[in-house]
Image: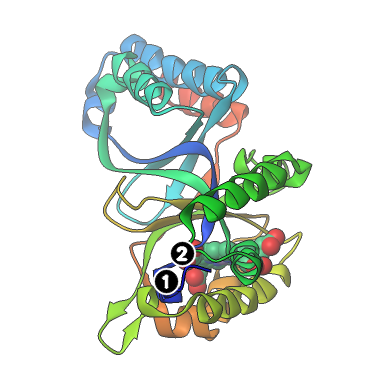
Amino acid sequence: MTGRPLPHSSELPPASLEGWYVLHQSIELDWAGLKGAEPAQAREALRSFAALAETWSADSEPGWSGVYRVAGGGTDFLILHFRDTVDRLIEAVSDLKLSAWGDHVLVREEYLSVVELGLYSLTRELAERIDPGDREAWDAALADALAEERRKGYVGRRLEPRQPEHMPYVCYYPMDKRRNPEQNWYRLSLEERAGLMAAHGKVGRRFAGRILQVISGSMGLDDWEWAVTLWAADPLEFKAIISEMRYDEASAEYAEFGPFLVGKRMAGAEFEGLISSRAAQ
Ligand code: 76R
């Protein structure tokens, strides 16, 4: 030891692994324009939407995009884009705007983030063995631990999430952790944060098989700190998990929530339905 004081552990962020970039797009349809368009033109626009959705879900490797019909929220569609680079997200957005469908939509909101696994217990265990103040030793040990973590199959699957087959409903919202004088998440010690997140994870795991959650980090990328994306077979599960977590200390004391959107995955046949209802006019 050099005798240098340990950094106060509130200054130690959790190590994290990042996966695919995510763009959440809230899209409103230009209903008046579509209804007033020539039927052939409206059909062409809807066909191009169906074709885009098909291409996005089948040929966007590495990544995919899903289209969801939204209930409420003052918008029509939520499109979720997952890609390995920001450049490819930009391309997906251009493809939408350049398509015939692009002439009939208004992008209401967009939110950029990157899939994040916050590794609180790994960070805490490492800090028990290695002095985080010794930057060289800390950085080397952390790089090894992260590489080992990334090699685990289930970690890879969480960093590159897929649409869960039997969970067509999606719930999305951005959130922050509080920074009030008496309730500042960022001034808690690593031990306190790791303890709270372990309890949070315990609540979360009670929903195993009923909810699939993706946390994506957006510090430096967008206006909030995280985006939360949940999938379920039954939308009541969203209410159940979010209510339950709200009483758990990590959320009860420290969570701030942005606006929520809930939607249902649009299947291929539904695109055809949209097309035929237009064509019938
Ligand atoms: O150690 C552990 O087991 C915890 C693993 C874990 C982390 C690090 C975890 C588990 N989450 C983590 C991070 Mn979560 N999560 C949310 C919401 O906050 C609310 O009240 C509602 C929003 C839900 C519904 C949810 C679900 N989680 C985070 C973070 C980042 C915090 C940070 O890094 O400081 C946020 C903002 C957040 C919010 N979480 C789980 C779930 C579920 C279902 C689990 C268990 C999943 C599993 O382990 O398989």
Identify the residue at horizontal 25%, vertical 18% (top origin).
37
Residue type beneath disc 2:
Gly
Relative to the observer, which residue lies in front, 187 or 96? 187
Identify the residue at horizontal 51%, vertical 76% (top origin).
193
* Element type where label 2 sits in the image: loop
Relative to the observer, which residue lies in front, 11 or 28? 11
Ligand 1 found in image quarter:
bottom right
Residue 276: x, y in percent?
Answer: 50, 22
Residue 89: x, y in percent?
Answer: 40, 27
Identify the residue at horizontal 60%, vertical 75% (top origin).
200
Instruction: Identify residue for label 2.
Output: 133
Q: Is residue 133 above or below residue 195?
A: above
The C terminus lies in quadrant: top left
Identify the residue at horizontal 64%, vertical 74% (top origin).
198
Specify few, some or many for label 2: CA neighbours under 10 Å numbering under 14, 14-19, or 20 or more.
some
Relative to the observer, which residue lies in front, 15 or 106? 15
- Give the quadrant of residue 55: top right
Q: Residue furthest bottom?
A: 182
Dot placed on the residue nearer the N-terminal end, 2 or 1: 1
Residue 117 in view (yes/no): no
Residue type beneath disc 1:
Arg
Distance of label 2 from label 1 (alpha carbons): 8 Å
Within 8 Å: ligand 1 and the Cβ of disc 1?
A: no
* Element type where label 1 sits in the image: loop
Instruction: Identify residue for label 1.
Output: 4
Q: Is residue 252 above or below residue 270?
A: below
Specify few, some or many for label 1: CA neighbours under 10 Å numbering under 14, 14-19, or 20 or more.
few
Residue 235: x, y in percent?
Answer: 59, 61
